[in-house]
Amino acid sequence: MVFSLFKRKKKNQKPESIHTHYYPLKVKEVVNVTADAISIIFEQPDPPIAYKSGQFLSVIAEIDGKEVRRSYSLFTSPFVDKDLGVTVKRVEGGLMSNYLNDHVKTGDTLMVMQPMGNFTSEYNKDNKRHVIMFGGGSGITPLMSIIKSMLHEEPESIVSLLYANRNIDSIIFKDALEKLQNIFEGRFHVIHILDDAPMNWQGPSGLLNHEMLEKLFERIPDWGIEKSTFIMCGPEGMINNVQELLEERHIPKEKIFRESFVAGIMNKPEPVATDEIVARMVSVVYDGEEHTFEVKPKNTILETALYNDIDLPFSCQSGLCTACRCRLVSGKIKMDEEEGLSESEINQGYVLICVGHPLTDDVKLEVG
């Protein structure tokens, strides 16, 4: 089975070329990690695809005659693993997640976009720090990538992971996490929290709420705020609870990192109502070509570009994955959602056109 993406084309017209940011990757192995999740291992092409721990791949497939794109975090480490791997958990009503779980197999070729995302870290063998992680469900995926890189690249650093799941059978990477604990004893410690624990369970059980977090904090080594970093990835409720506790403990914001794009599917935010959003002309420079088109008030810049057969990169269409990131050369735009961009990117003039609306008549954007 081969899923492919080419430039949008007229009926019966053969594709001519693939943009450099798309890769056809061969599936080396499909592993059932839980009853409702699989890991897809891709063979690295030649030359290999460069990526950072914590980034994601956007998978593209044609399902029921419609092109679908969803982003899935890489659980592999560029320092440890030869191949690339993503984990896909079934989502109720999830078009792509269910399709991949039901159909993808060894030998297939999937089209993906180049790795993206800012949920990353730089590593240095001289670093000596304590990284405290909070994960929930499939939010473990990017954390797994970071854990492996951290333990491999920073021999003086330690990692503590608080990982919440529904029950023992839903723990993704359960055996791999246990193996890492044994290999890196004293440097890597996992605390599993189960909402529905079995009778013989000796660990914490129940929701990862404020009271439980307070107790669990007492079990984490205290290296002091200066040497500690806090990162989280999981359901919004869990992230909010952790954020609240860290604020109560006066943890500086620059020490806290979070990833919201977890499940590979997001609801698109409603457009922000404002009198300034009217029909305006927009110019987009992509692959050396400049495209000019009118954007209606109820449409985003990306929606309009795709409608006009301009094959711009995109994935989540929710303002979180940054696949559609552009640099604003001139003019002003309004974004319905800014969470996907870092403060540094915003200061450099980057915008997300999947949630972007032009506010002036001189909007010019550069892709890439």
Image: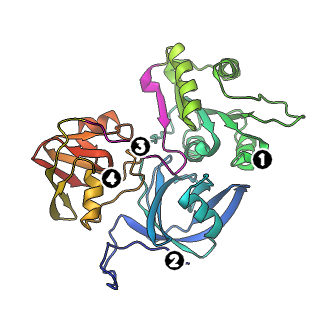
What separation in Å lies between label 2 and label 3 (alpha carbons)? 30 Å
Q: Which residues are magenta?
A: 252-273
Tell me residue 258's x, y (percent): 49, 34
Helix, strand or loop at mark 3: loop
**Which dot marks residue 169?**
1
Q: Amino acid at mark 3?
A: Asn
Residues packed near mark 3 inside 10 Å, few (<14), some (14 to 19) or many (20 plus): some
Considering only order in the chain, which callout, 1 or 2, is on the residue closer to the N terminus? 2
**Which dot marks residue 2?**
2
Q: Residue at x 58, y 43 (%)?
A: 139
Considering only order in the chain, which callout, 4 or 2, is on the residue closer to the N terminus? 2
Q: Is residue 306 left or right of residue 174?
A: left
Q: Amino acid at mark 1?
A: Asp
Q: Is residue 74 left or right of residue 38?
A: left
Quadrant of residue 334 in the image? top left
Tell me residue 217's x, y (percent): 66, 20
**Which dot marks residue 324?**
4
Helix, strand or loop at mark 2: loop
What separation in Å lies between label 2 and label 4 (alpha carbons)? 25 Å
Q: Is residue 281 left or right of residue 206?
A: left
**Which dot marks residue 118?**
3
Label 2 or label 3, whichever lies nearer to me, is: 2
What separation in Å lies between label 3 and label 4 (alpha carbons)? 14 Å
Q: Is residue 270 magenta?
A: yes
